[in-house]
Amino acid sequence: MDVKTMHARRMAFGLAVSMVCGSVWAQTVPKPKEFYFDEDRSTTRPVVVVPGNGDEVVDKLAAIVQRDPRAVEARVQLGTLALAGGRRELGDQLYKAALGTMATSSQQYRQATWNYGWALLRAGDAEQALHQWVTLSSGRPATPDWLPPTLALTLWKLDRKDEAIAWFAAAARTWPDKWTDQASIAELLPGWSDAERNDLGAVQAAWQANPPAWP
């Protein structure tokens, strides 16, 4: 076998592997329900033990964890800061250590998982962010109001546009007086960045252009 043939076969094999891995790891997302009326404010709160950013905050949080290994909220905040600072491996370790001490049915677990999703999304990993949020879609409350716009944003970033529009449609069905007006997005999502709100605005425009029928 000549060198060119070997190189071509290796490239073909690498492409096949990447396609298989992509299909295996693509997050399966359930179809949206008709309405999402449940408020879930205890889940959608950033975990903040020590306000602020920077090395001083990190040092204080690290000292808390050293004194009390069960200080899971400090670990969660440290995980968020690590991911924001580009330290992905450390951020994952901190979050997984914190989540591993919580009952998956607990409210604290839901809050930490919601925070982990946002930390991952803002670190550039929309696929793993989606995974975190999908794990909350089958819990309680059954129809949290934050889920449709959050999944719509994330699916749009992953170029899964039909699914993104379908999830945005669930928000619009639930609160047509809110989600059908693009000017209201900033008011509805004060914790989102301008770029995130702009992306959701693109989903909204696509929904308005061709709203999917229910079911």
Image: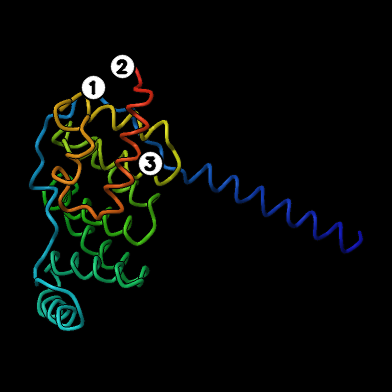
Residue 34's mark? 1
Going from N to C along the chain, the mark reached first, 1 or 3, is 1
Image: 95 above or below 202? below
Q: Residue 188 at x, y = what percent?
A: 14, 42
Residue tagged 3 = 155
Helix or strand or loop: what does disc 2 sit on? loop
Amino acid type, residue under disc 3 in the picture: Leu
On the image, the x and y values in percent for residue 55 come to 20, 83
How busy is the neighbourhood of tag 2: few (under 14 within 10 Å), some, or many (20 plus)?
Answer: few
Task: Give the structural element (helix, strand or loop) at label 3.
Answer: helix
Disc 1 and disc 2 in contact, CB within 8 angstroms: yes
In this rendering, position of residue 146 left or right of residue 135 = left
Q: Which residue is nearer to you in this view: 47 or 52?
A: 52
Would you name the residue on which mark 2 appears? Answer: 214
Q: Quadrant of the N terminus?
A: bottom right
Earlier sequence position, callout 2 versus callout 3: 3
